[in-house]
Image: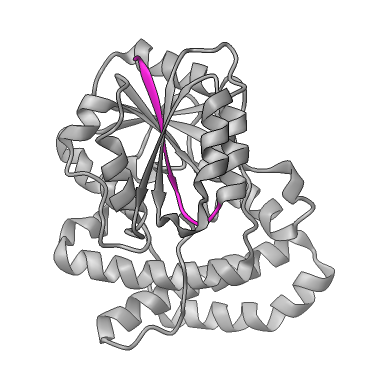
Amino acid sequence: MDLSVLISSYRRPEVLARTLEHLARQDPDPGFDVVVAIDGDADHGPARLEEFRERAPFDLTVLRFPHLGHGAVLNRGLEAVRGTYCLILGDDIFPTPEWIHHHLSRLREFNRPEVAVQGLTRWHPDLFPDAFLEWELESGAIFAYPRMQPRSFVSPEFLFTSNVSFTTRWLRSTPGFPEDVPWNMDTLFAFRARAQGLRLFYEPRALAHHFHRWSMHTEVSRRYTQGRLAARLEAGEPEFSGFITHPRLTPWRRLRHAASRLARPAAERFGPRSLRGWCWMHELNYQFARGYRDQQAGREDRHSFEPME
């Protein structure tokens, strides 16, 4: 078997079914199998997956675990991967028909085990119109694709386990995906995998669509959580500080945040788009910096956030 697709799934049985349907329509058909690792099986009835297994044009392996988290379930699912190459796909990411073809072509072209291929993930067209997601597409506030040079090697910090491929043997040689973090798992994995020589190539033709409603409110909580986590990781691994860029809670940032807070209600209601985006970016940067400072000061968590797995 040349290729396996590995999916970690958490509480999204209906969307997972659509993801599998998109995998069934790959063209040209490269011949592959799929491993679905279910992170807590209470929300995934076996009947639908069994029905799909009977008619799928690929071998489907379903693994069930108690709720362990995204990184832990990926590690356990990787043990069942049979392909020379492993393509990791989010359970709410719908691949386009030539998605596997472009991943596999690049992996074979480089023929170097340490090279991983990062595909492009766009928000699904059915989620629009949406002012926040439209801004994210332009700014790369969540997924940093606007900061990547297409069809070139990019910083490993841009690795996203929603749409990325590896040589399986090399992936198994790494420390594995972190199991003790609620967010930044991808970034922390890439940071540690550099010791194994990780190189990340960005191939936008390996396109998939993210079917997940995301809002400014949710992103604010995520940024605060990211800030706390970054401070925690730096305390244990000081070199991590140089691997990511993150804002600090300076007096100037506080002032800009206060100004953006005043302007934001009118900007969100009437525009212009540039002012609205300015307000959103300052809010997100402020929340990251605030989370970072709170973690350093030992303050309790001010947000309740469930990761987008």
* Quarter of the image that includes the N terminus: top left
Q: Residue at x 79, y 53 (%)?
A: 129
* Image coordinates for residue 203, horizontal then vertical, percent: 48, 26
Q: In the rendered view, would you say 297 is above or below 36?
A: below
Q: Residue at x 62, y 53 (%)?
A: 212
Q: Nearer the viewer, residue 303 or 234?
A: 303
Residue 302 is a magenta residue = no
Q: Is residue 268 visible?
A: yes
Q: Residue at x 18, y 69 (%)?
A: 235
Q: In the rendered view, would you say 107 is above or below 248?
A: above
Q: In screen coordinates, is 277 left or right of 54?
A: right
| Quarter-of-image position of residue 277 | bottom right
Question: What colouring style does the render use?
Answer: one colour
Q: Nearer the viewer, residue 139 or 217?
A: 217
Q: In screen coordinates, is 274 left or right of 91?
A: right
Q: Nearer the viewer, residue 252 or 31?
A: 31
Q: In the rendered view, would you say 174 is above or below 308?
A: above
Q: Is residue 146 visible?
A: no
Q: In screen coordinates, is 266 left or right of 207?
A: right
Range of magenta residues: 1-12
Q: Residue at x 23, y 57 (%)?
A: 240
- Furthest residue toward right: 270
* Image coordinates for residue 254, horizontal then vertical, percent: 49, 82
| Quarter-of-image position of residue 226 | bottom left
Q: In the rendered view, would you say 87 is above or below 282?
A: above
* Image coordinates for residue 289, horizontal then vertical, percent: 40, 74
Number of marks in the rendered image = 0
